[in-house]
Amino acid sequence: MASPESFDYIIVGAGSAGCVLASRLSEDPAARVLLLEVGGEDTNENIKAPAAVGLLFHSEVDWDYRTVEQEAAARAFYWPRGKTLGGSSSTNVMIYARGQREDYDGWRDEHGATGWGFKDVQPYFVRAERNNRHGPPSHGTGGPLHVEDRRYTHELSHAWVDAALAWGLPPVGDIAGASPQGAGLTQVTCRDGRRWSTADAYLRPALDRENLTVRTGALATRVVLERTKAVGVTYLRDGTEHFARADSEVLLSGGVVNSPQLLMLSGIGPTEVLREHGIDTAVVSPGVGKNLHDHVLAPIVWETRDTSDVILDLLTPENLQQWTKTSDGPFASNYAEAMAYLSVTPGVSRPDTQLTGGPTAFILSGQEMPARPVFTMNATGLQPRSRGQLTLASKDPQEKPLIDPRYFTDPEDVTTLLRGLRTVIEIGEQKPLAEFLARPYMPDSTDLAALDEATLANHIRTWSGTCYHPVGTCAMGDSDAAVVDPELRVRGVTGLRVVDASVMPTITSGNTNAPTIMIAEKAADLIRRPLTS
Ligand SMILES: Cc1cc2nc3c(=O)[nH]c(=O)nc-3n(C[C@H](O)[C@H](O)[C@H](O)COP(=O)(O)OP(=O)(O)OC[C@H]3O[C@@H](n4cnc5c(N)ncnc54)[C@H](O)[C@@H]3O)c2cc1C
């Protein structure tokens, strides 16, 4: 029998984190790196065009998950995740956000994640970034990840920001900075009006390195252990099972669903799950799959009137033609154009709510698109308290696991969203936005301000959706529930780390792509010698 292929590092998953690792680790020509990705090349024509993001839902580049029925909402939620080179950075809404200083200091102080306080992680955000407006010391201008002011912003989004200021929020000059507070326009991970994923930023520039091997269409099925040492990975490709040996380390970057699934399939997880599925236990790790949490967004949608640019559908042939020629116009919109960070809880100054929206209704989960032009503004609770879990449905690696974020099981999460929606409604009454809003579309009411608490809470349970930021299923820390230590090594195993959004012990107070890229940048330094930057 031929001896197995061997590499120094095997990375599972070419997503936001995996592409960073593949690029950084292969900078050392002596390091042999294998990157396995189950999705295909990122050639889907809708990936590049920001406004086409909704067309990626349920497509071949989407895992197209659904949660189990959520007991506090009496329904299941659609859960997209990217399945192609770039992972979810190839299918996300492109908002660039870092979260708040307190998030990272909390990882360090409350979870024992030594080395992950804000002052420790800030240099890695900066190293990754190439911002077209903001510069040092808090932003990077020479990194691989392009971040820019969006090339197209609808007048309604400008009007919303002005209305938010009239309501009382301060303007934010740098909404992509540390701990933003107030209202402004989003910055996006785009380069000259086109999506810039981690496959663009990190992987493609490294592809001609002889020491980097990338295999698409390759589903990792198990981490192979010799006693408690990871020595390689089995994977399915073209209907055949292969084994690749890792002489140094196996690095799991399959994301919040797949990393814990793969650990459990490899015998690393809670005893009861391994026993139920007849998987031999290699290492008992009770926290695998636990601590699942996510941001939820709840919308208010209005029909609009009298806008100079009447938008019913951004995806017209004319808009496509304009974007193809000049990379601007409505096709360069990522929908989530306007944003605010604020606290809606009396007596609390740290922002606990994000408002995000723009000139369409793309967030409507499961509802038909309205036949008239609309404007949507969503509220999201930034520090949700509900905690769920991810567990196996089967020991077949091709079967999707059971995803149960247990949304709204902590009633405080509904309270925060209620207060957030009240703010959205009040901002909608301010000039200059109010003149553009013809009538409420969702909830269907003639007087939003008069809606009672029960009606609004029911609206939240019925129409909210994931904000696409699940984290926490392989949490880092120093407690017994922690799956990885602060160097992201799986506790109880040698030669195995998890490097992706699943290691966040608590969710960051904003969108999670840039924080995941930061985690992978820092992980690269933990794995190899620190780079001089
Ligand atoms: C629709 C959507 C909108 C979003 N909008 C924003 C936004 O506007 N701004 C923001 O900051 N964040 C946003 N996010 C969140 C952000 O993109 C994610 O938090 C981040 O991409 C997670 O990175 P990751 O590396 O953990 O996982 P991913 O990027 O999901 O990568 C995991 C990769 O591993 C592959 N994989 C999984 N299992 C296996 C296996 N067994 N074998 C081989 N390959 C495997 C997957 O196919 C995938 O490519 C959004 C996410 C989605 C889905």
Image: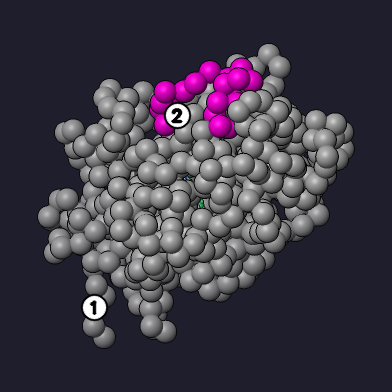
Tags 1 and 2 touching, CB below 8 Å? no
Image quadrant where residue 403 sits? bottom right
Residue 360 position, x and y percent, is 59, 49
Residue 459 position, x and y percent, is 79, 45
Query: Could you classify mark 1 by the number of other residues whose Cα lies within 10 Å: few (under 14), some (14-19), or many (20 or more)?
Result: few
* In this view, 39 is above or below 135: below
Q: Secondary structure at mark 1?
A: loop
Per the model, the C-alpha gap separating discs 1 and 2 is: 53 Å
At 63% from the left and 25% from the top, the residue drawn is 431
At 75% from the left and 53% from the top, the residue drawn is 70
Q: Secondary structure at mark 2?
A: loop
> Magenta span covers which residues?
159-179
Residue 187 position, x and y percent, is 41, 37
Q: Is residue 107 visible?
A: no
Colour basis? one colour
At 37% from the left and 57% from the top, the residue drawn is 322
**Amino acid carrying mark 1 in the image:** Ser
Image quadrant where residue 97 sits? top left
Q: Nearer the viewer, residue 82 or 227?
A: 82
Residue 33 position, x and y percent, is 24, 60
Q: Which residue is mark 2?
A: 175
Q: Magenta stretch containing residue 424, yes or no?
A: no
From the image, which quarter does the C terminus lie in?
Answer: top left
Q: Which residue is mark 1?
A: 3
Counting residues from the start of the chain, the first of labels 1 and 2 encountered is 1
At 35% from the left and 77% from the top, the residue drawn is 242
